[in-house]
């Protein structure tokens, strides 16, 4: 009974802070209506509301007393982590408000702003990006000695899990193409084509189908479930953005949830005859595992140990100058707990996990300051040119679901997460300009 009372008190405190922050953001920063989905509302409603809110209360109230992650943390660490979680929500909203006052307000462009596309030069642009898409996939698969999905289908779950991590390092080719470029380029082509075809009515149905199949196969080959779900969710969010919220979208969400449960059970080798166990694993994965890394970080990385992680996320040439490897606090936590991070992958966590590991108490302010600035700049960058909204809008929703609060703080620390949207946005714009140039040459001839 006492535990339930404590749980209720902390739940009340958490929800009070959470909804107060949402009210503040809606009034002074950007619309937080469910129909006006944006990089701020998505993170607060999905990343915090679904993945972090309940888990944080479960940790601090002690209801998870038998959970392996809970037993690894002390009361002192749990109190600090919970406080950091609440403080980060408040500071994030304040910093976002400051940026809007110093620079300009945040808003999502209207569909009416979209300019009519030139049919012939657009055809060259679409064929160009799809051809690069196909060639990139061929290059990646020729560079892989073994494919994790094949091992999973053959029944070797453990080997598939190990290959998923090792393939990123043992790829026989240009590693940045595999680890970074292909990871974002392949789904982004399908998403841009979806927007142009379905939303703007441009006839590129077959090109979209080709890119869609390539994206699904590519995202599934290393057995990770989240990238596929992010991809499908991006398509759904674009549909909602343009058409408005429809009740049938609730069914789409249900389908995505069911699909994710099937994928999860398949990947973990859990049969549907073990339904109770399956639901426990899925529930724990959603409500506990996403926030657990933050509580464990406050246990293993007190302020006096943070010097080792202060350069998390720094460019490789900076790390080499000071003689450091690319450290990862989340991976080190898993090594402390399990001793074999290769088999388990990287632990998900709220961004304050890495902020604390890197900067100690300074991370309480520096974490939300850096993350909010990254989001502000991404929002401004992808809507920079009105004539290229047909590129900016789909890419905005792609990165909206990828660069989230539960991503590793190292993605934000040195603004490295800005580089990828920057490259892709201006890369697609350059491709479109190049396509116009090619069309004009043929037209003159």
Image (spheres, grey):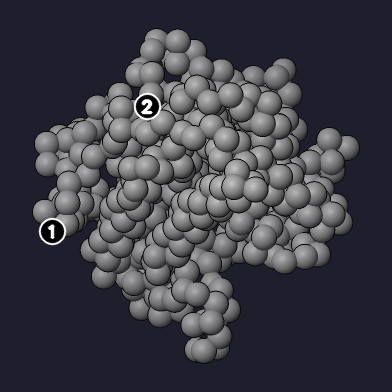
- Number of marks in picture: 2
> At x 34% / y 48%, what residue is drawn?
385
Residue 18, percent across and down?
22, 38
Q: Position of residue 315 (x, y in %)?
A: 50, 75
Q: Please rate how many residues cluster around mark 2, counting C-alpha atoms within 10 Å: few if below 14, some from 14 to 19, many from 20.
A: some
Image point (41%, 43%), residue name? 388
Residue 164 against residue 127 in the figure, above or below: below
Image check: 293 left or right of 41? Answer: right
Indicate left or right for 161 with 381 as reference: right
The residue shown at (46%, 62%) is 419
From the top left corner, tell me how far across and down residue 74 is, in percent: 39, 57
Q: Nearer the viewer, residue 342 or 248?
A: 248
Up the image or down, 141 lies above or below 216; here it is: below
Q: Residue at x 32, y 37 (%)?
A: 38
Q: Quadrant of residue 325?
A: bottom right
Q: Would residue 128 be seen by someone viewing this image from the given angle? A: yes
Of residues 222 and 186, the one drawn nearer to the viewer in this rendering: 186
Q: Earlier in the sequence, mark 2 or mark 1?
A: 1
Q: Which mark is residue 26?
A: none
Residue 364 seen: no
Does dot 2 land on a helix, a strand or a loop?
Answer: helix
Query: Which residue does the numbered mark 2 point to in the structure image?
Result: 241
Residue 274 position by quadrant? top right
Determine whether 33 is above or below 371 in the image. Answer: above
Where is residue 16 shown, x and y percent of the image? 17, 35
**Residue 92 relative to residue 416: left or right:** left
- Image disc number at residue 102: 1
């Amino acid at each position: 009974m006492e535990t339930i009372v404590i749980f209720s008190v902390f739940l009340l405190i958490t929800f009070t802070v959470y909804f107060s922050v949402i009210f503040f953001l809606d009034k002074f920063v950007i619309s937080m209506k469910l129909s006006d989905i944006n990089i701020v509302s998505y993170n607060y409603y999905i990343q915090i509301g679904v993945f972090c809110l309940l888990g944080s209360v479960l940790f601090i109230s002690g209801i998870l007393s038998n959970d392996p992650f809970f037993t690894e943390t002390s009361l002192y660490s749990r109190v600090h982590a919970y406080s950091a979680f609440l403080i980060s929500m408040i500071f994030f909203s304040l910093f976002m408000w400051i940026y809007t006052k110093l620079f300009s307000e945040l808003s999502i462009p209207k569909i009416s702003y979209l300019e009519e596309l030139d049919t012939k030069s657009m055809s060259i642009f679409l064929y160009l990006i799809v051809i690069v898409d196909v060639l990139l996939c061929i290059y990646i698969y020729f560079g892989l000695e073994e494919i994790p999905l094949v091992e999973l289908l053959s029944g070797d779950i453990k080997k598939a899990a190990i290959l998923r991590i090792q393939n990123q390092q043992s790829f026989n080719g240009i590693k940045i193409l595999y680890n970074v470029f292909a990871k974002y380029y392949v789904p982004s082509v399908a998403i841009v084509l979806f927007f142009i075809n379905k939303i703007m009515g441009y006839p590129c149905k077959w090109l979209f189908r080709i890119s869609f199949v390539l994206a699904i196969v590519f995202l599934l080959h290393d057995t990770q479930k989240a990238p596929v779900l992010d991809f499908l969710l991006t398509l759904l969010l674009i549909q909602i953005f343009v058409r408005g919220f429809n009740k049938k979208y609730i069914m789409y969400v249900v389908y995505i949830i069911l699909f994710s449960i099937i994928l999860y059970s398949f990947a973990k080798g859990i049969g549907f005859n073990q339904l109770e166990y399956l639901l426990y694993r899925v529930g724990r994965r959603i409500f506990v595992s996403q926030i657990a890394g933050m509580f464990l970080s406050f246990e293993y990385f007190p302020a006096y140990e943070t010097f080792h992680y202060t350069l998390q996320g720094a460019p490789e040439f900076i790390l080499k100058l000071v003689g450091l490897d690319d450290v990862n606090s989340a991976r080190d936590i898993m090594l402390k707990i399990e001793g074999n991070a290769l088999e388990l992958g990287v632990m998900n966590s709220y961004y304050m996990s890495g902020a604390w590991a890197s900067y100690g108490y300074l991370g309480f302010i520096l974490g939300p300051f850096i993350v909010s600035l990254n989001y502000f700049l991404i929002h401004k960058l992808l809507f920079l040119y009105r004539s290229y909204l047909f590129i900016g809008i789909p890419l905005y929703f792609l990165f909206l679901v990828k660069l989230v609060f539960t991503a590793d703080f190292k993605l934000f620390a040195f603004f490295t997460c800005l580089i990828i949207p920057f490259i892709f946005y201006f890369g697609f714009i350059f491709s479109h300009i190049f396509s116009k140039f090619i069309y004009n040459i043929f037209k003159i001839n």
